[in-house]
Amino acid sequence: MLSDLLHKLLSTISDQWTWWWEASNKKDERARAVLTISILLLSIFYYLWTFLKPRNQISAPLPPGPRGLPIVGYLPFLSTNLHQQFVELAHQYGPIYKLWFGKKLCVVLNSPALAKEVVRDQDTVFADRDPPIAGLALTYGGKDILWSPYGHYWRTIRKVFVREMLSNTSLEDTYTLRRDEVKKTIRELHSKIGTSVEISEITFLTEFNVVISMLWGGTVDSHRADSVGTEFRTVVIKIFELVSKPNVSDFFPILARGDGDQEDGLKSKGKKDFIQILLELKEQEDASVPITLQQIKAMLMDIVLGGTDTTVTMVEWVMAELLHKPKVLKKVQEELADIVGLDNIVEESHMPKLYYLDAVLKETFRLHPAVPLLVPKRSNKLSIVGGYTIPKDTRVLLNVWAIHRDPQAWDDPSEFKPERFLSDTSKWDYSGNNFQFLPFGSGRRICAGIPLAEKMVIYLLASFLHSFNWEVPQGEEIDLSEKFGIVMKKSTPLIAIPTPKVI
Ligand code: HEM
């Protein structure tokens, strides 16, 4: 029965095949030849497309990783000091591994080579964010620079921010604002000589006032800025613990009121500040990306949050490392005396000559990167990293804390040695091109505030260390332990006593 059927099928195919070649005239013959070749070529392409290309991708396995529990995955096993736990997992599973957070696949990368694959070789695949709920709630569904998806809107608002607030010209124009705030802080510290000072508190108020005055063009009166600043600090701390959803308008009263009053004040000064530029963009009906008031609020929240907590954290870490290492502190102060002079005050123009302080800052960034896992990335298509498949929509974490302590990349990785940054200085900048050193991230989503961050951290440190000697309160020791968070702080706040400089 079956053999009959097979015989019938073969004879039909053979009949058709014969008919195919038995062309009645030349024209038919040519047409059939073209058709045959086309079918052949199509079959070859189909074969290559179906079997070869996908096989290369699919054959790569998912990265290794620990088994979690059903439904919740690895979530119950996460420790409070995630950055260190991630290093331990790297010892077990290698520099790339996967974790399931509930139904969400997360891949952690722990080496400079893997970082390069993600932020350089396949940057566009990983330029999307994976925002937490709190991040979305805070920014009206990710309408800020940090959480907005990679695309036209993100590109436009980032460009406006970088061009209008952080270009060389804008930074030069706003130098007096920074100078006034730092001078005010130094005066305040003079009144606290001999008493205990919480370094992060005093630094926060200065940095907050700097950022606010850069946004508002210096029109917020200093008394109001200080009271808003104190209130804002409490909120910032809460936000970074991801438990709070503040009303942005509380901190940007101008946006709650409407823009009329502010515009009048600025017009009389004859100069536009960042907020006015944003409000003008909002009015433009023909803009390729129309900007709404909500989006402006989200962006401002980004700038104030991103600009304050990270900067403050780094100033605190450097001060802690210096107080822990008196010899290094002495060298920094000698350099300041040499470059600034004993009778002068520190100016931003001194910064490029403070090589040793710069190396101390970089060494602190290496050991205590303010954002240890960068900001979570999301793959927007299936790709291969380190020989493993990363499916679309995977959360990708770049463990910069581990990369900065990788023994294959650094000699004596846990030692504090600023000298390592003094040789071959061109190799050590914040551009994210050296994948061993990524305190500000790298690629398209690299920190947008680097020019201001770099200036402010060094300016504040140089001013504190040039104006005073610093002591640890009697009986206390410097604690250098870390508390994990999106921004990684010291476990305990640094308390230090400013004392007069003996000239
Ligand atoms: C020491 C200070 C600072 C550190 C260590 C720091 C670090 C970072 C890091 C690691 C990222 C994520 C990069 C990535 O995912 O690859 C980031 C993003 C960002 N930072 Fe900073 N930052 C600092 C200061 C600032 C300042 C002063 C501002 C603004 C005034 C700012 C604004 C931003 C913004 C808007 C983004 C989002 C960029 C985007 O997604 O396109 N940051 N920062």
Image (cartoon, rainbow, N blue to C red):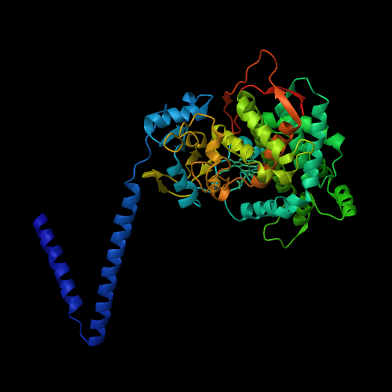
Q: From the top left corner, tell me how far across and down residue 484 is, in percent.
A: 57, 28
Q: Is residue 143 left or right of residue 95?
A: right
Q: Quadrant of residue 26?
A: bottom left
Look at the image and tell me whether residue 143 can be seen: no
Q: From the top left corner, tell me how far across and down residue 156 is, in percent.
A: 65, 55
Depth order, front residue of 247/201: 201
Can you say which quadrant of the picture contains the N terminus?
A: bottom left
17 over 244 or under it: above or below: below
Can you say which quadrant of the picture contains the C terminus?
A: top right
Q: Is residue 311 left or right of residue 276?
A: left
Residue at the extreme top of the image, as rendered: 475
Q: From the top left corner, tell me how far across and down residue 131 is, in percent.
A: 58, 40
Q: Is residue 484 left or right of residue 498?
A: left
Please report the residue visible at 64 percent of the width from the left and 29 percent of the height from the top: 329
Please report the residue visible at 47 percent of the width from the left and 42 percent of the height from the top: 394
Q: Quadrant of residue 114?
A: top left
Image mark count: 0
Depth order, front residue of 389/123: 123
Q: Quadrant of residue 487?
A: top right
Depth order, front residue of 311/386: 311
200 over 31 or under it: above or below: above
Look at the image and tell me whether residue 307 can be seen: yes
Q: From the top left corner, tell me how far across and down residue 298 is, in percent.
A: 70, 44
273 over 245 or under it: above or below: below
Residue at the extreme bottom of the image, as rendered: 26
23 over 158 or under it: above or below: below
Q: Quadrant of ligand 1?
A: top right
